[in-house]
Image (tube, helix red, strand yellow):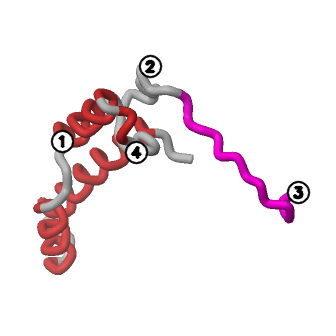
């Protein structure tokens, strides 16, 4: 299971990777063009953290947290622990 802080870091690092692809002339033009198109709609680090703050402010509207307010390897102390889903499947052992 991916935790919110891990997802936040992955999104931020992916944006940086796309930017590196875009700036590298040794990468084929078609790949750079695709990176440019993706970056137009990709959230910035600020937008990711802002989404994390919105989720912290209104956790009742979130089924599970998507983003966190940090990427330092530790989940935010303000998040509740993940919910456990109960399964009532008689075929499950």
What residue does disc 3 label? 93
- In this rendered view, identify the residue nearer to me: 31 or 25: 31
**The residue stretch that appears in magenta:** 81-93
Residue 23 in magenta stretch: no
The structure residue drawn at horizontal position 55% and vertical position 29%, both measured from the top left corner, is 81
What residue does disc 4 label? 7
Q: Please state, as top left, top right, bottom left or bottom right, where the C terminus lies in the image.
A: bottom right
- In this rendered view, identify the residue nearer to me: 63 or 24: 63
**Looking at the rendered structure, which numbered label has been put on residue 47?**
1
Which is more N-terminal, label 2 or label 3?
Answer: 2
- Disc 1 crowd rating (10 Å Cα; few below 14, some 14-19, many 20+) is few
The structure residue drawn at horizontal position 45% and vertical position 29%, both measured from the top left corner, is 73
SS at mark 1 in the image: helix
Q: Does the residue at mark 1 contact the one at mark 3 (Cβ under 8 Å)?
A: no
Which is more N-terminal, label 4 or label 3?
Answer: 4
SS at mark 3 in the image: loop
Q: CA distance from mark 2 to mark 1?
A: 20 Å
């Amino acid at each position: 299971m991916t935790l919110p802080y891990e997802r936040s870091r992955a999104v931020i690092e992916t944006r940086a990777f796309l930017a590196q692809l875009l700036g590298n002339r040794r990468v084929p033009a078609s790949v750079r063009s695709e990176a440019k198109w993706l970056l137009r709609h990709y959230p910035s680090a600020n937008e990711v953290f802002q989404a994390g703050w919105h989720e912290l402010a209104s956790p009742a509207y979130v089924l599970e947290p998507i983003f966190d307010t940090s990427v330092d390897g530790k989940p935010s102390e303000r998040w509740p622990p993940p919910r456990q889903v109960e399964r009532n499947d008689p075929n499950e052992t």
